[in-house]
Amino acid sequence: MLRVVVMVSGGGTNLQAIIDSVKNGAITNTKIVGVISNNKNAYALKRAEENGIPEKCISPKDFDSRDAFNKKLLEEVKAFEPDLVVLAGFLVVIPPEMIAEYRNRMINIHPSLIPSFCGTGYYGLKVHEAALERGVKVVGATVHFVDEGTDTGPIILQKAVEVESGDTPEILQRRVMEQAEWKILPRAIDLIANGKVKVERNRTVILP
Ligand code: GRF
């Protein structure tokens, strides 16, 4: 049984997709053992509570230094004894010690087809604003392992989404979530839970 901790900062629609997928069997062999947020007002925490999942809020604002926060964050994550850490819209920089501890056991959902519209400064609506500004006709989402870079770890799954005329950043964001994020994040977790994802030379191999 894969023990999963999900880290969130906002509405938690990706967390909800994971919860629903565990419930309906789209994700097998998996238990969400905890949800951690840096934002006490994150609706994602309410989603966890409503589904009986232990949740914690750990905010950098409550610590005298970033080092103290980083230490506590890693402590709290480790306390859940996760096999996999899922970043689902978690907007805090992951400490290097935590990346090392969970190398190839921590994944992130990014709302673009990496390597487009990713890296420092590309998060939330900014990703979709940049895509519309560039005039691309296809966008999408990516699930990848987390390494020391920003959105640079081995890619696990991607799913493309068409840009439609009249799209605003908000409309496009919602379509990417509905048609891509909420599908590939649960699928990636199920693949990992069933031993189907290997990392070779910093690229993933998805086993049949
Ligand atoms: C999603 O758009 C995800 O791609 C990005 O942050 C957002 C989180 O949304 N990393 P939610 O909290 O899952 O609704």
Image: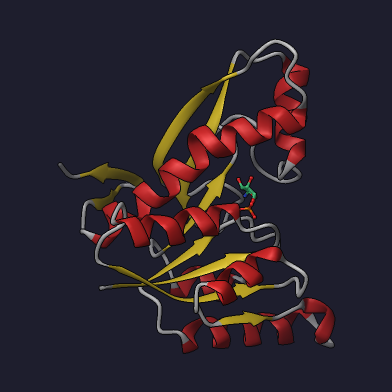
Residue 160 x %, y %: 48, 25
* Most distant residue in the top direction: 165
Residue 93 x %, y %: 68, 64
Residue 204 x %, y %: 31, 45
Left or right of residue 105, residue 59 in this image: right
Q: Quadrant of residue 112?
A: top right
Point out the image quarter for the N terminus: bottom left
Left or right of residue 58, residue 155 in this image: left
Name the residue at 78% across, 77% down: 60
Name the residue at 71% across, 72% down: 38
Q: Quadrant of residue 42?
A: bottom right
Name the residue at 15% across, 41% down: 208
Left or right of residue 29, residue 144 in this image: right
Residue 121 x %, y %: 76, 44
Name the residue at 48% across, 53% down: 17
* Residue 60 visible: yes
